[in-house]
Amino acid sequence: MSGHLLSWVIFLPLLFATVLLWIPRRFDRAFYFLGVGASALTFALSLHLFGEFIPGEFGFQFQERVDWISSFGISYFVGIDGVGLVLVVLSALLTLVALLSTWTAVKARRKEFVIACLVLETAMIGTFAAMDVFLFYVFWEAVLVPMYMLIGVFGGKRRIYATLKFFLYTMAGSVLMLVGLLTVYSMHITQFGFASTSIPDLLQVGITLSDQMWLFILFFIAFAIKIPIFPFHTWLPDAHVEAPTAGSIILAGVLLKMGGYGLIRLAIPLFPLAAHFLAPWIALLAVVGIIYGGLVALAQEDVKKLIAYSSVSHMGFVVLGLASLNAVSMGGAVFVMIAHGITTGALFLLVGMVYERRHTRLMADFGGLAKSMPWYAAGFLFITLGSIGLPGLCGFVGEFLVLNGSFHALVLKHPAWLVGFSVLGIVIGAGYMLWMFERVFYGPLKFEENKKLQDLKIVEVVSLVVPIALTLWLGVRPGVVLSRISPAMEELSNHVQSHVTRYETGKEVE
């Protein structure tokens, strides 16, 4: 197994999903235990991957390559750098948390639900590990099918509308990305005389600035939809509100990160000049998204929709950090992705717990829950503080690095103004999150049902322990993650700067 550790992490959930297909439906509880067992084993292997990864080294580790469709230059080519590593571990963790949450949440069609979650896990991890653009695109698109099923079959009353909106938005972006990939692929054949879909090979293609501009825009729209940032965000609140708890955890915790990862792995390195010249406009979009997401969140009465709009704001920091194109801010952007995945995934988990008890998510229907559910309130408060970036918790580290790096980013025309408005978004975020917590957990117990609510069950405590521990641990020991992602971010920043220098000295392809 050690020689193919990454492949085991990718395909183990799919292997279990295939086994589950043959188990009779009458063994209802068996699907839950097997699903949790499969995701727990995958998470354990991902932790082994994390431990075996060598911090501080440049390049990709755990590489595996096998010819697949040789006539088109397509191969099964996987490997991870520090960015892929932390996102693989995050995917494995949140899939486990999501499946743990289904103990009482999913009663009908449990077999299909567990299989969809496991197939989705393979597709997500495969996306973060792919080093071949064809393989990347296959995994990227494969995510749509189980996610469509999770929302469309197990979602709320408006699930069909939300699912179609999610599917159409994502497919539109995927088509644009496919056009860009095929263009770069054909350029490689023209320039080098042989076909290859390997990402390292495609990075050698010489592309003029004008071609880089329109190709980068195609890729950026595809990834901006997935992130999502303003104005490509409108599918997200509907999808979150209608998705089951497990779907929301995975959607917020992992799927949104695929957009940021796509910018890091494909858009910026393939088109570095375009990324450099368009950076100020991308940063402006990011800051608009930060403030817009916060202001709209302030107006929400549904707790789940409030958290959904908070994701638009948080992911704006990711895009701002990546647009700054220096190692500090881009490292901060990746850390924001990890922190957001942990805290927002946990928030959706917590909202799902109280929804199962009260079957409502409206803040007006709560009040005084701290008296009837003290342990639940304590866990919710801790995760909330992590989400708003309290120093000492994980949310603070990434946002600080993004703001610090962006303030010194020469590529941005007015970094001080952008950073200043970004800080306003943090203040707004603290406002709507603490206001929501006060309305839900304090004040009088207005409804009789709220007085009888049961506090956390054992399975709920188990599913919350790891996110709470990571929220504290990554806030106190961020170097565990930063030491692994920093080399990749330095390499990407140097890659962009070298192309800009060559362009300015007339050595870059015109």
Image (tube, rainbow, N blue to C red):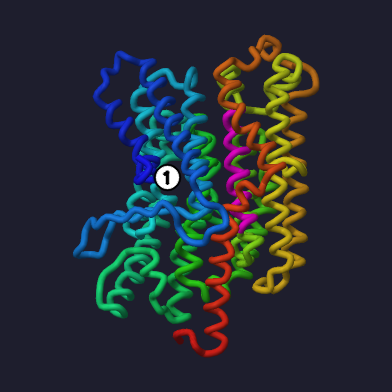
Q: Position of residue 480 (x, y in %)?
A: 62, 46
Magenta residues, start to end: 331-351
Residue drawn at (39%, 39%), measured in percent from left and top? 120
Label 1 crowd (10 A; few <14 / some 14-19 / many >=20): many
Q: Is residue 315 left or right of residue 416?
A: left
76 or 379: which is nearer to us? 76
Residue drawn at (52%, 41%), measured in percent from left and top? 90
Q: Is residue 339 in the magenta section?
A: yes
427 or 469: which is nearer to us? 469
From what the image shows, is residue 470 above or below residue 285? above
Q: Is residue 399 left or right of residue 220?
A: right
Q: How many marks?
A: 1
Residue drawn at (42%, 57%), measured in percent from left and top? 173
From what the image shows, is residue 337 above or below residue 71? above
Residue at far bottom of view: 506
94 or 208: which is nearer to us? 94
From what the image shows, is residue 198 above or below residue 122? below
From what the image shows, is residue 322 above or below residue 7? below
Q: What residue sits right under mark 1 in the picture? A: 125
Rendering quarter of residue 177: bottom left
Q: Position of residue 230 (x, y in %)?
A: 58, 56
Q: Is residue 221 left or right of residue 394?
A: left
Q: Is residue 330 in the magenta section?
A: no
**Looking at the rendering, in which quadrant would you find the N terminus?**
top left
